[in-house]
Image (tube, rainbow, N blue to C red):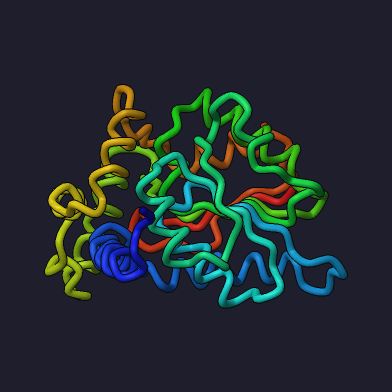
Amino acid sequence: MGLSLAAAERWVERWERQQRRYAVGREERFGVIADVVEHATAGRADRPLIVDLGCGPGSLSARLARRLADADIVAADRDPLLLELVRTHHPDDARYIDAAIGAPGWTEALGLERPLDAAVSTTALHYLGPDALRHAYRQLAALLRPGGVLVNGDHLPQGGPQLAAVTGWVGRRAAERQGAFGDEDWEAWWTAVAADPELADLLAERERRETEPCPAAGLPATAHLRLLRGAGFTRAGTVWQWGDSHVVVAVR
């Protein structure tokens, strides 16, 4: 028996609230990502083809689908529970793929039949270490058409502990002013999920797949830009920042 729409709506809505604790200016960041994709695809005859990397329960894909109604979106994630939430809650926004960024065969699993116009991601790529990130960036450069863009909204610290502390503090203070810390946090959300019988099978599958936890690499934005330029992108830079929350854009 599949997940009910009511359950998917409830858990996605709670996800949206808890994520406000971690991504300062989250809606603005989503808007900037959509702006970049809109700019990169303006005036093209073909329907825009976009891949959302580490889509989770569809936060970015759903917003892109609303902004770019003619786009073909492929959304990929390795978490079976989050994928089932998005497949149930946003069934028509994207084609959903069970794949882990950087795993063997992951680009083939996307089933792309033409070059991408854009690859987008939010709060997923910072978990990759330098070698895995370098390889993934090279793979993405090969999938994008000339002039296509990679757009990454993520938590990227400033280089050096002093600046990292300042940007982290700016982000926390902004979140306090927005009332974000009144919502449940990541751990509380997953604890609540574990108590829902309707999610038991999905949670068991998620735990079955888990290996050793992947620590956040914590690479600064400057390191990401250097890796992108070395991976075949002609230009790379930060187009938006609030605290340690960035939108980085790389042009193929």
User: Where is residue 248 drawn, in percent x and y?
Assistant: 54, 53
| Horizontal side, residue 39 vs residue 1: left or right | right
At horizontal 65% and vertical 42% (from top left) the residue drawn is: 110
x then y, percent, for residue 129: 44, 28
In depth, the one of 152 and 158 nearer the eye is 152
Residue at 27% over, 57% down: 22
Position of residue 61 in the picture relative to residue 143 (left or right): left
Which residue is outermost to the front? 1
Where is 130 relative to 250, above or below?
A: above
Question: In screen coordinates, is 113 left or right of 217?
Answer: right
Can residue 140 be seen here? The reply is: yes
Q: Tell me: residue 149, above or below residue 173.
A: above
Asked which quadrant contains residue 120, the reply is bottom right
User: Residue 163: x and y, percent?
Assistant: 31, 47
Position of 18 relative to 1 (above/below)? below
Q: Horizontally, is 21 left or right of 12 in the view?
A: left
In the rendered image, residue 60, in percent from the top left (x then y), is placed at 48, 63
In this rendered view, identify the residue nearer to me: 198 or 17: 198
Residue 216 sits above or below residue 118 on the image: above
Q: Residue at x 50, y 35 (%)?
A: 100
Q: Quick one: which residue is furthest to the right in this view?
A: 45
